[in-house]
C-alpha cells in the first residue's frame, strides 16, 4: 500500500513538472497577417504583433529586453494576381523614427526590416492585448487582371526570416518560429464571387419615353468588368450590348429604349472570369399618350484650334427627349459640303492631317422613342482651326472668386501683373465658372502692360464685369508674348476688421497631375474648428482619377472614382467629393490619376476667423 501511494505521488509530481514546462513553452509572441475581402483593385492588409507575457521580449521585461526590432517576411501566392505591393509601418510604429529600415522584395515576396532605439523611440506595445495585438505595419496590394473572383491570395509568413529582437538584436532573447518563442499566423485576400441584380425588377415605360436599369454587383469589383446585356424582344425595347462596371465600384446605370408596345425580359450576365452570375428584369412598354416632344437644339463646344494629327473632341449638352444626335462636319460655314454621323453619345472625336484648314460643326437632337421621329433645329455652328503651331501658352489660377461663404465670410481675389521685360507683354484673362466645362465664349479681359509697369485689380471678377461667382482663371499670353509676373491673393474681406488670406500661384500645365501620378491632401485634425473643401480643375482633355481615403492608422475607409470633362472647375465640400463620407479628422486623401490632367487642392478655412489656406496636391515622387 505504501509503495503504491509513493508511486502515485511520483507520477503526479512528474505530471505537474511536465505541465509547468509545457506552459512555459506555450508562452509565445505572435505575428499576424490579416485576412481581408478585396473591395477593389487596391487592398489594405494589416500586420500586427501581439506582445504576450512570459516571453524573452516584452513590456513585462526590463529594458533592454523589449521588442524594438522586427523582420517580417510575407510570401503571397499566386504572385501573378498582384501587380505591385508596398510594405510600410503603421499603427504604433507609424510615427516613430527608426535607426534602420529596409524593404527587400521579389516576385511573390516582400519584407519589412526595422529597428528603433529603446531610449528615444520605444515601441508602445500593449501587453497581452486581444488578438491580433497591436497594428505595426500594413501591406497595400494592387491586384492585377489575374485576380480571379472566387479565389484567395494566400499571405504566409516565412518562418526562417520572420523574427523579433531587442534593439541590439541579441541572440539570447531573439524570438523566432524555429526556437518556439514566436507564433506566426498567415492571412489571405479573399476575392469574392459577385452576385448580380437588375433594378427595378419590373417597370413600365411609354413608347415616347425611356427607362433605366441599375446593374449592380454584391461587392466592389477588382477589375473593370464588362456586363453583357440582352433583350428577349428587341422589337419591344433595347439595351446596350454591354456595360462596363469600373474597378473599385459595383454598379452602372443603363438606358432602356422603347420600340413598340409589349413586354420583354432584360438579362444581364457577368463574364465567366467574374463568376458568370446573371440577373433579369421585366420591362413593359405601353403606348404613350403624351405627344412626341421635339428636342431643343444642343449647345455645342469644341477647342478653338487643334494641332495637325492630334485628336480633339466636339461635345454638346444632353437634350431632354433626345434619343440620338446627328453631328455635321463641313469645310464651309454654309455646310454645303457637310458629312454627318449619328450617335447616342454627347461627344465625337476628330483628327485631321492638313494644317491651315478650318472645320465647322453643328448638331441636331433627334427623338425616335417609340413611334416618334422628330428632329431639333440645328445648333449654333462652331469651328476648329487645324494648325501646325501649338495652342497659346497659358497658366492657371486654379480658384478665384467674389462670393459669400460660410460663417459670414466673403471671399474675393486680388491680382497684380508686373512686366519685367523690355517689351510690352499682352494677353487675356479667361474666367471659367464652376460646374460647367469651359468654352470659347467664357468671359475674358485683355491686358497689355508696358515695360516695367504693374497693373492691379482689387477684386478681379467685378473688374471682368462678373458681379459675383466662383471659378478659375486662365492667364493666356498672346503669340510671342512673354508672361507677366502674377501675384494673386484670395482673401476673406471682413470690412473694418481687415482681411485674412493667402497667396495663389499661377500654375503651368506641366504642374498638373497626369496619368500615373499620385498626390495627397491631408484632412484637418479637428474638423469642428476647420472646414475643408476640395477643388479640382481639369485641362483640355478632362481627367479621371481615384480618391482613396485612409484614417489616421492608414486603414482604407473609402475609395471613389471620378471622371470630369475638359476645362472644368469645381470646389465642393469633402462629403460631396467622397460620395457622402463624413470625415472625422486626420484622414489622408490619396489621388491617383488614370487619364487626362488635373489640379487638385484642399481649401481649409478656420470656422471662427474665416482665415483660409490652400494645399495643392503635388505629385509624389
Image (spheres, grey):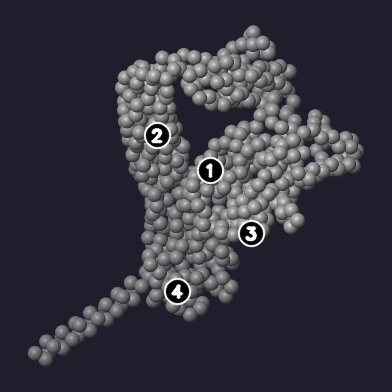
**Label 2–label 3 contact, CB within 8 A:** no
Q: Please tell me which residue is depicted at 82% across the width and 43% down the height of the picture.
A: 456
State the image quarter where residue 26 is shown: bottom left
Circle 3: element type: loop
Residue on which the image places disc 2? 214
How packed mark 3 is, by other alpha carbons closer than 10 Å (few <14, some 14-19, many 20 or more), is: few
- Seen as rendered, the residue at the extreme bottom is 2
Q: Mark 4 or 3, which is nearer the eye? A: 3
Circle 2: element type: strand
Q: Please tell me which residue is depicted at 73% across the width and 29% down the height of the picture.
A: 391
Q: Please tell me which residue is depicted at 61% across the width and 21% down the height of the picture.
A: 350
Mark toward the start of the polypeptide (2 vs 1): 2
The Cα atoms of the two marked residues, 2 and 3, are separated by: 44 Å
In the image, which disc is placed on residue 58? Answer: 4
Q: Nearer the viewer, residue 137 or 82?
A: 137
The Cα atoms of the two marked residues, 2 and 1, are separated by: 22 Å
Q: Nearer the viewer, residue 325 or 206?
A: 206
**323 left or right, relative to 327:** left
Residue on which the image places disc 3? 608
Mark toward the start of the polypeptide (2 vs 3): 2
State the image quarter where residue 306 is shown: top right
The Cα atoms of the two marked residues, 2 and 4, are separated by: 54 Å
Mark toward the start of the polypeptide (4 vs 3): 4
Q: Mark 2 or 4, which is nearer the eye? A: 2
**Label 3–label 1 contact, CB within 8 A:** no
The Cα atoms of the two marked residues, 4 and 3, are separated by: 47 Å
User: Could one spot residue 615 in this view of the protein?
Assistant: no
Amino acid at each position: 500500500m505504501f509503495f503504491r501511494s509513493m508511486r502515485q505521488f511520483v507520477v503526479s509530481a512528474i505530471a505537474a513538472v511536465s505541465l509547468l514546462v509545457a506552459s512555459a513553452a506555450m508562452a509565445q509572441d505572435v505575428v499576424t497577417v490579416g485576412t481581408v475581402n478585396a473591395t477593389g483593385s487596391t487592398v489594405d492588409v494589416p500586420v500586427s504583433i501581439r506582445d504576450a507575457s512570459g516571453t524573452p521580449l516584452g513590456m513585462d521585461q526590463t529594458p533592454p529586453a523589449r521588442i524594438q526590432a522586427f523582420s517580417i517576411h510575407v510570401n503571397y501566392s499566386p504572385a501573378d494576381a498582384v501587380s505591385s505591393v508596398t510594405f510600410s509601418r503603421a499603427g504604433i510604429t507609424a510615427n516613430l523614427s527608426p535607426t534602420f529600415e529596409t524593404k527587400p522584395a521579389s516576385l511573390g515576396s516582400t519584407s519589412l526590416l526595422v529597428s528603433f532605439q529603446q531610449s528615444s523611440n520605444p515601441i508602445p506595445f500593449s501587453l497581452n492585448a486581444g488578438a491580433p495585438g497591436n497594428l505595426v505595419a500594413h501591406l497595400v496590394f494592387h491586384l492585377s487582371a489575374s485576380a480571379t473572383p472566387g479565389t484567395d491570395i494566400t499571405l504566409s509568413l516565412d518562418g526562417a526570416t520572420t523574427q523579433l529582437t531587442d534593439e541590439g538584436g541579441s541572440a539570447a532573447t531573439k524570438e523566432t518560429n524555429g526556437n518556439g518563442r514566436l507564433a506566426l499566423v498567415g492571412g489571405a485576400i479573399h476575392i469574392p464571387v459577385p452576385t448580380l441584380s437588375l433594378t427595378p425588377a419590373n417597370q413600365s415605360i411609354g413608347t415616347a419615353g425611356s427607362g433605366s436599369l441599375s446593374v449592380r454587383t454584391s461587392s466592389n469589383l477588382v477589375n473593370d468588368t464588362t456586363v453583357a446585356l440582352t433583350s428577349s424582344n428587341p422589337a419591344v425595347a433595347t439595351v446596350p450590348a454591354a456595360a462596363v462596371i469600373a474597378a473599385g465600384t459595383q454598379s452602372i446605370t443603363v438606358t432602356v429604349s422603347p420600340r413598340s408596345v409589349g413586354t420583354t425580359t432584360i438579362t444581364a450576365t457577368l463574364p465567366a472570369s467574374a463568376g458568370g452570375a446573371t440577373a433579369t428584369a421585366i420591362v413593359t412598354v405601353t403606348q404613350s399618350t403624351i405627344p412626341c416632344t421635339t428636342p431643343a437644339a444642343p449647345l455645342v463646344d469644341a477647342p478653338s484650334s487643334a494641332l495637325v494629327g492630334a485628336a480633339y473632341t466636339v461635345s454638346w449638352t444632353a437634350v431632354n427627349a433626345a434619343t440620338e444626335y446627328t453631328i455635321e462636319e463641313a469645310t464651309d460655314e454654309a455646310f454645303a459640303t457637310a458629312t454627318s454621323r449619328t450617335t447616342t453619345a454627347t461627344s465625337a472625336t476628330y483628327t485631321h492631317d492638313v494644317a491651315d484648314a478650318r472645320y465647322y460643326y453643328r448638331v441636331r437632337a433627334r427623338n425616335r422613342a417609340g413611334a416618334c421621329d422628330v428632329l431639333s433645329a440645328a445648333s449654333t455652328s462652331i469651328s476648329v482651326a487645324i494648325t501646325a503651331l501649338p495652342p497659346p501658352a497659358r497658366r492657371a489660377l486654379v480658384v478665384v472668386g467674389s462670393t459669400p461663404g460660410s460663417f459670414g465670410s466673403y471671399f474675393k481675389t486680388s491680382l497684380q501683373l508686373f512686366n519685367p521685360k523690355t517689351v510690352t507683354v499682352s494677353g487675356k484673362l479667361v474666367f471659367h465658372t464652376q460646374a460647367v466645362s469651359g468654352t470659347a465664349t467664357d468671359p475674358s479681359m485683355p491686358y497689355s502692360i508696358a515695360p516695367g509697369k504693374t497693373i492691379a485689380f482689387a477684386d478681379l471678377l467685378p473688374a471682368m464685369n462678373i458681379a459675383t461667382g466662383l471659378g478659375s482663371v486662365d492667364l493666356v499670353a498672346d503669340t510671342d508674348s512673354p508672361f507677366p509676373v502674377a501675384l494673386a491673393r484670395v482673401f476673406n474681406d471682413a470690412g473694418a476688421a481687415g482681411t485674412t488670406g493667402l497667396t495663389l500661384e499661377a500654375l503651368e500645365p506641366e504642374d498638373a497631375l497626369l496619368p500615373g501620378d499620385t498626390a495627397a491632401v491631408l484632412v484637418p485634425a479637428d474638423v469642428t474648428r476647420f472646414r475643408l473643401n476640395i477643388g479640382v480643375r481639369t485641362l483640355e482633355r478632362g481627367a479621371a482619377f481615384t480618391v482613396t481615403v485612409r484614417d489616421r492608422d492608414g486603414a482604407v475607409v473609402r475609395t471613389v472614382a471620378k471622371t470630369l470633362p475638359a476645362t472644368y472647375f469645381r470646389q465642393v465640400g469633402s462629403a460631396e467629393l467622397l460620395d457622402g463620407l463624413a470625415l472625422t479628422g486626420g484622414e489622408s486623401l490619396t489621388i491617383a490619376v488614370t487619364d487626362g490632367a488635373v489640379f487638385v487642392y484642399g481649401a481649409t478655412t478656420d470656422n471662427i476667423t474665416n482665415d483660409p489656406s490652400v494645399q495643392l496636391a503635388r505629385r509624389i515622387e
